[in-house]
């Protein structure tokens, strides 16, 4: 977890050196240069391995494989362009070395992206060549001895050293280290931008020019004039003059969810398709720009604060979505204050990014989940670098005092204990890593050894062949968990209650095995370290692009619309837009947006139907239609006139009515309202 995401970036030196150098904290007491060299070595070996395997899979030349890899990359963040520049600079030497049957280790040592310091062991991922290492390396150096590229690699060039990028790099680095949004005009710690610590990490700001408007605050005068807490509820009901916020939220005890965590809480994930040649395609890297600008984390899908619902047929939701489902007044009130490499030691450097005012805001549920980095580090002598129970107690108490001074009264703090990580080696060491599946030449044991040698391992203590070391690491983790348990039992605070929960990973394994799964499936396949939350925690979803709706219910609705209605795209847009409002989403002709949830509002549905699903201006603000026709039409809600007058040709009301009756129990509210509206409309057609 500590500094680990740089290890597996598709290219630390190749594709995005900017993020490689700035987006993850270094080990606290080892030089940045030393670990930068280690990360660069791992990145080089990964990329050269992928190039070699692409040539093998597609029966092409090395040149063709490099061009194929670049063609797969998106244009965003200049990834494709950078890749072609790298080919132009390093390609000829890589071609010569791979054509001479040199493996990725030899290539990267020859080009000096990997270096063996005097007195240090030789770090390699693949089995050593049959010939002596020094002989093989000397032979490789003769092949490229006239290359000018070696001078470039020795220079340790850094894209952030360029004058026109220096300020941008510094601002991005500061935003990531402090865990605050890169783009935040009013400095209220909320943003309208998704990545770079934006609303993927905390609720989206609905007014980025007013620092008094942000998710989680108590409504200002019941939000009569504006949505001061960004939950989508504001204004006054014209029927009785009662503000909507007061009508729907008073007494409902709204509260937000805040996570203080490490990379596991941020939902660190590297897609296997990024390094598996046989699975690569034009679609493999679509999500890479988003992942890079979110530090290879996916907080929008995390178990605590994820707001994108699953499209994989998984019913379970994140804690935030469960809170939202129980009370829509909680809309957007989530904060993922997690960071790769976070621990009880360095939490103090970014806890101030937490946004909560004990006088102005709603109470919150805070989850403290530092589940690894107090026992995990990459040092060869790893045990002395682990946090002691005494120091851990001091760090946690410091955090709790800070929370007590910022959280509103009535909040709750929940401790998660540390897991027993011995399951990593026990279940993975003899399995092939995605990089070694093609040729059966790289196991997780080899990967662990390679990372440990370079001192860039996420957790030397558990990712080790030394059983004694693994046991000592688990014992220290248990000691720290017991410390949390004692704090929760004995310490009292004025503004929140304390609870403790075990990290019950062994129970999860047992349950997974009952379903027919294998324990190794519960671990992220690429890094071989993090929980594979798509498996071990069922409420995980899969990433989709921001142009699509991330919701199983939408998929279900679209399925029966396309399968049972013979109508054009305009019909679908009209019907689906109206359904979108009925189920609590905004009225918009630009399509559904899953994070913009709203309360279930019949008034919103009426307005949507009156305006053809939001594609036209509403003609009247009155609930009954002064423009709705003659005779009986004056007694009919304008909603039904909107439904009839704007119904596209070919839309069968009877077929929609039948589908209303068959909606699942989960959509019963929609089913009832749909049947009432369409039933009334059908009766009107009959009378006319």
Image: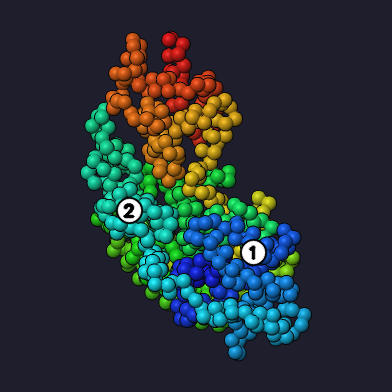
Q: For the residues labelled 2 and 1, say whether their Cβ atoms are less than 8 Å apart.
A: no
**Residue 616 vertical position relative to residue 232 in the rendered view, above or below:** above
Residue 688: quarter of image? top left
What secondary structure is marked by label 1?
A: helix
The residue wearing badge 2 is 363
Residue 632: quarter of image? top left
Nearer to the camera, 303 or 162: 162
Nearer to the camera, 160 or 37: 160
Locate residue 53, reporting x and y percent: 70, 64
Locate residue 270, reporting x and y percent: 57, 61
Q: Is residue 449 left or right of residue 604?
A: right
Q: Nearer the viewer, mark 2 or mark 1?
A: 1
Q: Is residue 463 visible?
A: no
Q: Is residue 298 left or right of residue 429?
A: left
What secondary structure is marked by label 2?
A: loop
What separation in Å lies between label 2 and label 1 (alpha carbons)?
A: 53 Å
Residue 66 is labelled as: 1
**Residue 628 vertical position relative to residue 467 in the rendered view, above or below:** above
Locate residue 477, reporting x and y percent: 52, 71
Q: Residue at x 38, y 66 (%)?
A: 168
Instruction: Answer few, some or many: residues within 10 Å of disc 1's Cα (few below 14, many 20 plus, some between 14 and 19).
Output: many
Q: Residue furthest bottom?
A: 119
**Residue 93 vertical position relative to residue 616 in the rendered view, above or below:** below
Q: Residue at x 34, y 14 (%)?
A: 629
Q: Is residue 60 visible?
A: yes
Q: Residue at x 43, y 39 (%)?
A: 590
Instruction: Answer few, some or many: residues within 10 Å of disc 2's Cα (few below 14, many 20 plus, some between 14 and 19).
Output: many
Which sits earlier in the primary sequence, circle 2 or circle 1?
1
User: Is the image coloured rainbow, by chain, by secondary structure, or in one colour?
Assistant: rainbow
């Amino acid at each position: 977890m500590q500094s680990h995401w740089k290890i597996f970036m598709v290219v630390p030196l190749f594709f995005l050196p900017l993020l490689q150098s700035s987006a993850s904290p270094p080990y606290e007491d080892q030089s940045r240069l030393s670990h930068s060299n280690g990360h660069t070595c791992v990145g080089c070996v990964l990329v050269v391995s992928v190039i070699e395997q692409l040539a093998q899979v597609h029966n092409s030349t090395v040149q063709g494989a490099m061009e194929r890899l670049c063609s797969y990359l998106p244009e965003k963040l200049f990834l494709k362009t950078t890749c072609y520049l790298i080919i132009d600079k390093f390609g000829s030497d890589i071609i010569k070395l791979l054509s001479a049957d040199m493996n990725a280790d030899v290539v990267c040592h020859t080009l000096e992206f990997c270096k063996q310091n005097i007195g240090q062991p030789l770090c390699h991922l693949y089995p050593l060549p049959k010939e002596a290492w020094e002989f093989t390396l000397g032979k490789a150096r003769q092949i490229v001895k006239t290359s000018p590229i070696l001078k470039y690699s020795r220079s340790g060039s850094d894209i952030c050293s360029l004058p026109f990028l220096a300020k941008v790099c510094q601002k991005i680095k500061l935003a990531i280290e402090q865990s605050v949004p890169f783009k935040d005009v009013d400095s209220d710690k909320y943003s309208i931008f998704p990545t770079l610590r934006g609303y993927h990490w905390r609720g989206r700001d609905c007014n980025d020019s007013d620092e008094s408007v942000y998710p989680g605050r108590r409504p200002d005068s019941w939000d009569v004039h504006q949505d001061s807490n960004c939950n989508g509820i504001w204004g006054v009901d014209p029927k009785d003059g009662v503000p909507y916020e007061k009508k729907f939220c008073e007494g409902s005890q709204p509260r937000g969810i805040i996570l203080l965590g490490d990379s596991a809480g941020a939902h660190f994930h590297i897609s296997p398709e990024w390094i598996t040649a046989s699975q690569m395609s034009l679609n493999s890297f679509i999500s890479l720009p988003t992942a890079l600008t979110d530090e290879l984390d996916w907080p929008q899908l995390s178990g605590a604060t994820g707001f994108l619902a699953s499209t994989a047929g998984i019913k379970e939701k994140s804690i935030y979505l469960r809170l939202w489902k129980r009370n829509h007044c909680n809309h957007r009130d989530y904060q993922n204050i997690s960071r790769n490499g976070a621990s009880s030691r360095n939490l103090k450097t970014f806890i101030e990014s937490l946004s909560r005012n004990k006088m102005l805001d709603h109470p919150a549920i805070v989850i403290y989940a530092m589940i690894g980095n107090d026992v995990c580090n990459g040092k060869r002598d790893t045990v002395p670098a682990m946090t002691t129970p005494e120091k851990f107690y001091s760090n946690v108490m410091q955090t709790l005092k800070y929370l007590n001074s910022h959280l509103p009264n009535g909040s709750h703090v929940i401790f998660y204990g540390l897991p027993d990580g011995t399951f990593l080696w026990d279940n993975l060491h003899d399995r092939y890593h995605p990089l070694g599946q093609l040729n059966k030449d790289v196991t997780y044991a080899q990967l662990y050894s390679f990372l440990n040698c370079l001192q860039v391992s996420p957790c030397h203590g558990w990712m080790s062949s030394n059983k004694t070391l693994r046991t000592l690491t688990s014992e220290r983790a248990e000691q720290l968990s017991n410390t949390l348990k004692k704090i929760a039992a004995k310490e009292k605070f004025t503004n929140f209650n304390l609870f403790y929960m075990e990290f019950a990973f062994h129970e999860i394994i047992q349950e997974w095995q009952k379903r027919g799964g294998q324990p190794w499936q519960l671990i992220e396949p690429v890094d071989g370290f993090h929980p594979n939350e798509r498996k071990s925690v069922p409420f995980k979803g899969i990433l989709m692009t921001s142009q699509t709706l991330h919701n199983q219910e939408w998929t279900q609705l679209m399925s029966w619309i396309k399968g049972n209605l013979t109508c054009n795209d305009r019909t679908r847009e009209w019907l689906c837009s109206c359904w979108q409002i009925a189920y609590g989403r905004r009225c918009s002709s630009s399509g559904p947006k899953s994070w913009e949830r709203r309360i279930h509002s019949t008034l919103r549905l009426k307005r949507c139907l009156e305006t053809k699903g939001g594609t036209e201006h509403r003609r009247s603000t009155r609930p009954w239609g002064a423009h709705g026709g003659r005779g009986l039409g004056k007694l009919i809600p304008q909603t039904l006139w909107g439904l009839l007058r704007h119904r596209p040709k070919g839309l069968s009301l009877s077929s929609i009515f039948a589908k209303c009756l068959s909606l699942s129990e989960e959509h019963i509210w929609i089913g009832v309202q749909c049947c009432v509206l369409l039933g009334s409309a059908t009766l009107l057609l009959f009378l006319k």
